[in-house]
Amino acid sequence: GDTVGEGVGGPCFQLEVTGLDAGEAVMRGALGSEGLYLATSNGRLVLFNVTLQQVPMTLGLRGSGSIADVSCGGTHCVGVMRDGGLAMWGGNARGQLGPSRRPSDSVKIGPSDAVWLRLPMRARAIRACATFESTVALSSDGRLFTWGSNEELELGRNADLQFDNKPREVEILLEEGEMILQVSCGEAHVLVLSHDGNAYSWGSNTHRQLGRGPLADEATQDLDDEGAAEALMLPAALELDLFDNEGLWQVEAGAAHSLALTTFGYLFAFGNCRGGQCGLLSGEPSPEPQSEKDAVAAAEAGVHKRTGDLIKRGEHEKGGPAMPARGSRPARPALQGSAGGAGGKAAAAGRGAR
C-alpha cells in the first residue's frame, strides 16, 4: 500500500484488501506474531504477513467457520465465531488454547489447524481477548470466562494456580442487573466495562495499570504484603475521579497501561507512560486534566499515540506510573448522544478488592 503517515516506529501504510465481495468490509483487526489479522463483514479472516503481503486464510473449524471478531496476545490469537464458538491458534505453553490440547512449550498451531472451543454451561461467546498467555471470553449473557496462564492472576480467580487450561467463570461483585459489555486485555491485566458505566480490572498491577486507589489500599491495609498484593490483583472496581452522573463509555488495555473514556468525553490514562503511550504531548503527566481539542471519539490503547484528546487526572513520579486521582469538581454537560452508561457510576468506590 501507499505510505499515509509516519508512526513512532516508522512509516504507516494503507493496506488494500483484495478479493472481497461487493459490500464486504473489514470489521475488526488484531496484530499477531504472524502479521495483521482482519475479520470481514462476511465472516472471513484475512492475514497481512510481516512483509505486508496478503495471505489467503482458512480457519480449520467444524462447521461454517464464519468469524465475527479476532484478538491476538503475545503468543496466540482467538477468533469469536458467529455461532458463539471460539477458534484459537498459536502457542499453548500455559494452556491458553483450551483443554483439548495439552500445554506444551514446543507446540505452535496455525490458523488452518485452529482449536475449536465451546464455553461451559452452554454460554455463547460474543467477545474475546488475549493476554500474553491467557484467554478471556465474554458471553452473550454477560458472564466472563478465563483460561491459560495465571502467574499474574490474569485469570481473575484461583490465586493458587499457575495456569489452568479449562475455561472457568470469573466472579465479579456486580450490582443487581448489572451486565458486562466490553472486555480488553493487556499483556497481563484485564479491563471490563458494564452497561451501567462501571469498570473493573484484575491481573498485573506492576505499573498501577489496574486503576486502583486509596479505597483499595484501605481495604487491604490489615493484610501482609503478599496477601495485599494478591487481593489487589483480583477483580475490583476502578477508582477514577469522575463528575456527578459521569460514567465510562469504553475501556482499552495496552501492554502495561490502561485508558478509560468517559461519557463526558474525557479520557483517563494510567499505568506505564514511559513511552508516550498515555498520550500526553509533553511526555509528562499533569495533576490537572489536559486536552488539545474537544472531546475524544474513541480510545485505542494498543497503539502508542501522541495525538488526539487523551486526558488524565492524576499525578505520578517523572516518567513513572500514572495513577488516577480523586476529588470533586463542577459538573459539565454530557456529550451529544451519550447513552448506555451516562448517569452510571464508573468508579463504584467502596466495593474493594476481594
Image (cartoon, grey):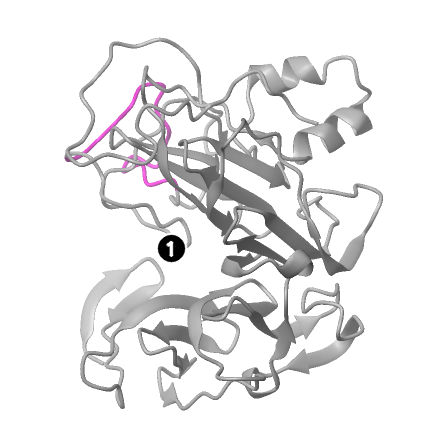
- Asked if residue 301 is among those painted magenta in the image, a careful observer would answer no
Q: Position of residue 339 (x, y in %)?
A: 26, 35
Decide which of 159, 127 is in the foreground and name it.
Answer: 127
Decide which of 170, 328 is in the foreground and name it.
Answer: 170
Instruction: Please tell me which residue is depicted at 53% across the width and 34% down the height of the picture.
Output: 200
Is residue 166 visible in the rendered image? The answer is yes
Locate residue 15 relative to residue 233 in the image: left or right: left
Q: Which residues are magenta?
A: 278-293
The C terminus lies in which quarter of the figure?
A: top right
Q: Quadrant of residue 224?
A: top right
Which residue is situated farthest in the right direction here?
Answer: 160
Tell me which secondary structure the magenta stretch mostly adopts. loop
Q: Position of residue 271 (x, y in %)?
A: 50, 36
Instruction: Please tell me which residue is depicted at 56% across the width and 37% down the height of the picture.
Output: 201
- Asked if residue 292 is among those painted magenta in the image, a careful observer would answer yes
Under circle 1, the secondary element is loop
Q: Position of residue 41 (x, y in %)?
A: 31, 73
Q: Is residue 13 above or below residue 174?
A: below
Residue hosting label 1: 303
Count all numbered tags in the image, as a single digit. 1
Q: Is residue 221 above or below residue 286?
A: above
Q: Quadrant of residue 102?
A: bottom right
Q: Is residue 328 above or below residue 194?
A: above
Instruction: Please tell me which residue is depicted at 67% across the width and 73% down the height of the picture.
Output: 91
